[in-house]
Image (cartoon, grey):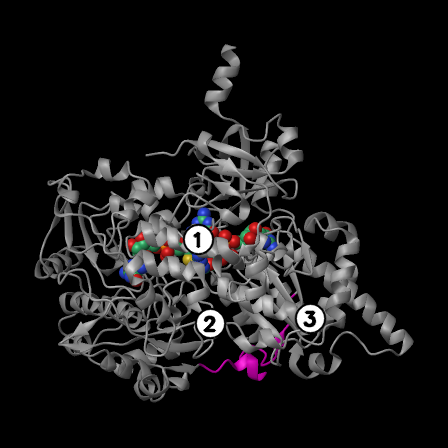
Amino acid sequence: MTEDPNTIRIDRSNHPAGGWGAVKSTFKVFRLQEIAGKVGTGLLRTNQPGAFDCPGCAFPDKPGKAVVDTCEQGQKAVAWEMTRKAPGPDFFAGHSLEQLRALSDYELESQGRLTVPLLYTTESGHYTPIGWDQVFEITGRELGALGPDQAAFYASGRSSNEAAFLWQLVARAWGCSNLPDSSNFCHEPSGYALKAAIGVGKGTCQLDDFERADLILVIGQNPATNHPRMMAALHDAARRGAKVVAINPLRERGFTNFSDPKAVGEMLTGRGMAVAHRIIQVRIGGDLALFKGVMKRLLELDEQARASGAPRPIDEAFIAQHTTGFEAVAADLAAESWDLLVAESGVRREQIDELAQLYAEAPATMATWCMGLTHHEHSVATIQTLANLLLLRGNIGRPGAGAMPVRGHSNVQGDRTMGATSTMPARWLDNLTGEFPQAAITRQAGLDAAGVTERLLRGDLGALLSLGGNFAVAGPDSTRVLAALSGCRFTLHIATKLNRTHCHPGQVGLLLPTLGRTDLDLQQGRPQVVSVEDSTSTVRSSRGIQAPLAATMMSEPAIVCGLGQALVPAGGIDWAAMAADYGQIREHIERVQRGINDDFADFNRKLAERGRLTLTNSARERQWKTASGKAEFNVHPVPTAGAVARARQRHGEAVLALMTVRSHDQFNTTVYGPDDRYRGVFGGRRVVFLSAADLQARGLRDGQLVDLHGCGDEDEHERVVRGFKAVRYDIPAGCAAAYFPEATPLLAASNLSLHTRTPAYKDIPVLVRAARQEQDTAGAS
Ligand SMILES: Nc1nc2c(c(=O)[nH]1)N[C@H]1C(S)=C(S)[C@@H](COP(=O)(O)OP(=O)(O)OC[C@H]3O[C@@H](n4cnc5c(=O)[nH]c(N)nc54)[C@H](O)[C@@H]3O)O[C@H]1N2
Ligand SMILES: Nc1nc2c(c(=O)[nH]1)N[C@H]1C(S)=C(S)[C@@H](COP(=O)(O)OP(=O)(O)OC[C@H]3O[C@@H](n4cnc5c(=O)[nH]c(N)nc54)[C@H](O)[C@@H]3O)O[C@H]1N2
Ligand SMILES: [Mo]
C-alpha cells in the first residue's frame, strides 16, 4: 500500500514541543497497540531499579527518578513492544512474499509480535511455522555448507550486552569475523574521530554535566524527537541561565518552543520556552567550516587579549600540558579564508563572531551531537575539528564540559563494548582466546556493513544473519540491497516484529521470534536479568516484567546459545549453561574485559547490589590513550569536493543536498504513524522540505508533487522516488530534507564517509523535478 500524498496536511502554527501534544500522542499509540490497561505497570517501572531499561534511545536516566513516564518517545517504544497483538496462525500461510512486500512498513510491524519460529523456502513460497530443534538443525546444515567466509552476522543496537557478547562469540568461534553492526550506520565516525583525538571513542560527559555547563552546543541533533530525556536536561539548563545553541539547518521545534511535561506552569498555560538562545542554520555539511570560523575568530580574540594583557580566551596551560599539534592548527586557521568559511558554512560572519564570543566567555562548554554530524563523507574530519574547538579552551575532563556523541539505540554502545563488531583490538582477541582456549577464535578483521553491502550487491554473500534490526532498509541503496538479499542461500533474522528485510529471505530463510526488553525472561524457572550501556558509559541491569505472548518465543541469549551449540558444538564452550543462567555469561564478560574495562570486576555482584556501574572514561580523567599520549589537534581542510559538489560539476547548480531524517512518529525503520507533529506534517510521510528560493528556481509550487532523482553515483542504476509532496520550509537554499526510509533508495551504496564507511545519509545529491504524472497532465492540457 502506498500512501496518497494528496491527503498530507501541513500545519504552520507553532505549538510547543513536549507539553500536552506529547501526552495525547502517547495515548494514541497505546490505543492502536491495544494496551491501555498496561500503561501503569509498564511505564512507571521503566528505567527504575529492578525494572527494564527503556528500549528507546541511549540517553542516560537519573538513578531513582521516574523519567520515562514523562518521555513520549520512550512510552511509544515500550507500547510498541508490549502490544498483545500478534499475526494469527493464517497470516503467513495466507501471504506470499509478494503480498507481504505490498504492505507498508507500518502495516508490516503493525501485525504485532512474532510468536513462532518461521521457515521460508523457495519451494513453499511463504513462511511456515517450525520447531526450535529444526531451526538449529537447519542453521547448522546451511551454514556448514557455506562456511564462515560466506556469512555475515549483523547486530542492531537493541539487544543486551549478554546477547551481543554471545553473538560475536558464536561468529568468532565458528571462524567468522564479518560482524557488521548498526554503529556502522550511526556513530562510527564519532568513535573513530574521538579515539584518535582524545584516546577514547566514547563521550566524556555525565548527566550532571548538563547541570554545570554554561554553554551547550547541540549539533546536528533533534532531541525533542529522538532524545526527549535530553530535552528535559536542556530545558533545566536554559532555565538556570545556561546558553543552549543549536547548530542545525532546521529550526527544530524543540529549540524554539518547548514545554516540559513535568513543568506544571508551562503545562497549564500551554506556553513553552525557547530553549535555544540561538539557532545557527548551517548549510548541510557546513559544520566543519563553521567550527573553523569560530576557532579562527577565537584566535583573533586571543591575539587581542595577548596584546592588551587581558585574560586569554584559549587555555594556554591546558594546551601546553595536555595536547599536541596546536601550532599546526593555529597556522592553518590563520591561512584560512573568511570568504570560504562563510560560503561553505552558509553562516554569516557576524553570527560566527557572535558564537566565538559566547564560546570565549563560557567557563564550561559541552558539545553534544548526533547524526547531523556523522552521516557525511567528511564526518571524521568534522568531528575532529569540533574536538579541536573543545581542546582550545580545555573543555574536556572538567565539570560541565566535554564531548558527547549522543548514541542512538538503547544499547548500541554496549554492543561495541561487548565486541559485536568486525574489528576488535588485539587485547580483546587475546582475552577471548584465553577465556575459551579450546575454541578456534578467529583473529581476522571482518567485513563492516559497507563491506557486506558490497558483497551482497555483487551476489557474493551466501548468508546474512541478524540479531534485530532491518539491515536492508536501514542501509543505503535499499531497493537494490533488498533485491540482492534474495540471492543469498540462507538468511536468519532474530526479531520482535516483522519488517521489510524479512520479506526478502534467501532461498532458505528463518525468522525467529524473540523476547524484548519488556518481556519477563524465565530460564529454568528463574527470572533473568540482562545489562545495557547508555551514552554516558553507565551499565545497568534490565529485567522484563510482562509474561511473554507465547511459550514458543525464546530470549536472545537462549537463541544465540542454540546457534552456538549448532555451529560450535566442540571447543569447550558451555552454551547450555550460559543459556540457563545469564550470570555465567557475565562471568565470561568480566574475565574477557580484564585490562580493558576493569570496572566490570565483580560484574554480577555490582549489578545485583547497585543495579549499575559506570565505566571509566580515560579522557574524562585527562589521561590520553592516543598515539602521542596527549590529546591531539588535527588539521582538516574545508571540504569543497564532496559528493554534492561533484554531482554539481556533472549536473549543474540544480543539484541539492538532501538529508534523510526521522519524523516524530518513528523509531528508525519502525513507523508508528504518519505524522511529524513538531514539523507540522500530518497524514503522510512522502514529503520533501525545500526553501522558497529552491521551489521558485525550479518553477514548483508549495504542495506540488515531485520526483526525486539521486545523482551521487554515475553507475548504470537509476535511483528515484516518485510522488513526494514539496513543502516550503525554512531550510537553507541548496538543502532539502525528506524522511527515511522512504528516501533511502536515493543514496548510492558508494557514498560513504571517509575512514569509517558510514553511509552519507545526510548529504545525498538529488535533482528535484515535477512529478512525472504532473508533467504528463501539463503536457496534455
Ligand atoms: N523516537 C526516536 N528516538 C530515536 C530514534 C528514532 O528514530 N526515534 N533513533 C535513535 C537513533 S538509532 C539515533 S542514531 C538517534 C538519531 O537522532 P538524530 O540525529 O537527532 O536524528 P535525525 O532525524 O537523523 O536528525 C538529525 C538532525 O541533524 C540535522 N542535520 C542534518 N544534516 C546536518 C548537517 O549537515 N549539519 C548539522 N549541524 N545538522 C544536520 C537535521 O536537521 C536533524 O535535526 O536517535 C535515537 N533515538
Ligand atoms: N536514510 C537513512 N537511513 C538510516 C539513518 C538515517 O538517518 N537516514 N539512520 C541510520 C541509523 S543512525 C541507524 S542506528 C540504523 C538502524 O538500523 P537497524 O538497527 O537495522 O534498524 P531498526 O529500524 O532500529 O530495526 C527495527 C527492527 O528491529 C527489530 N527489533 C526491535 N526490538 C528488538 C529486540 O529487542 N530484539 C530483536 N532481536 N529485534 C528487535 C524489529 O524486528 C524491528 O523491525 O538505520 C540507519 N539508516
Ligand atoms: Mo543510530
Identify the secondary structure beneath mark 1.
helix
Looking at the image, which residue is at 38% across and 57% down?
76
Q: What residue is disc 1 on?
A: 24
As drawn, is 753 to the left or to the right of 333?
A: left
Query: Separation of disc 2 and disc 3 at Cα?
Result: 22 Å
Looking at the image, which residue is at 64% across and 67% down?
238
Query: Separation of disc 2 and disc 1 at Cα?
Result: 25 Å
Q: What residue type is labelled 3?
A: Gly
The question of residue 776 being in magenta is answered with: no
Q: What residue type is labelled 2?
A: Pro
Q: In which quarter of the image is residue 520?
A: bottom left
Tell me: residue 90, above or below residue 593: above
As drawn, is 671 to the left or to the right of 708?
A: left
User: Where residue 536 sits in the image (x, y, percent)?
Assistant: 48, 74
Identify the secondary structure beneath mark 2.
loop
User: Where residue 480 sits in the image (x, y, percent)?
Assistant: 36, 40
Considering every residue shown, the one lying at the far right of the view is 308
Identify the secondary structure beneath mark 3.
loop
Looking at the image, which residue is at 24% across and 82% down?
583
Q: Can residue 447 be seen in this view?
A: no
Q: Nearer the viewer, residue 647 or 85?
A: 85
Q: In which quarter of the image is residue 385?
A: bottom right
Q: Which of 461 and 544 is in front in this view?
A: 544
Q: What residue is disc 3 on?
A: 241
Give the residues in magenta: 615-634
Q: Which of 625 and 676 is in front in this view?
A: 676
Q: What residue is disc 2 on?
A: 60
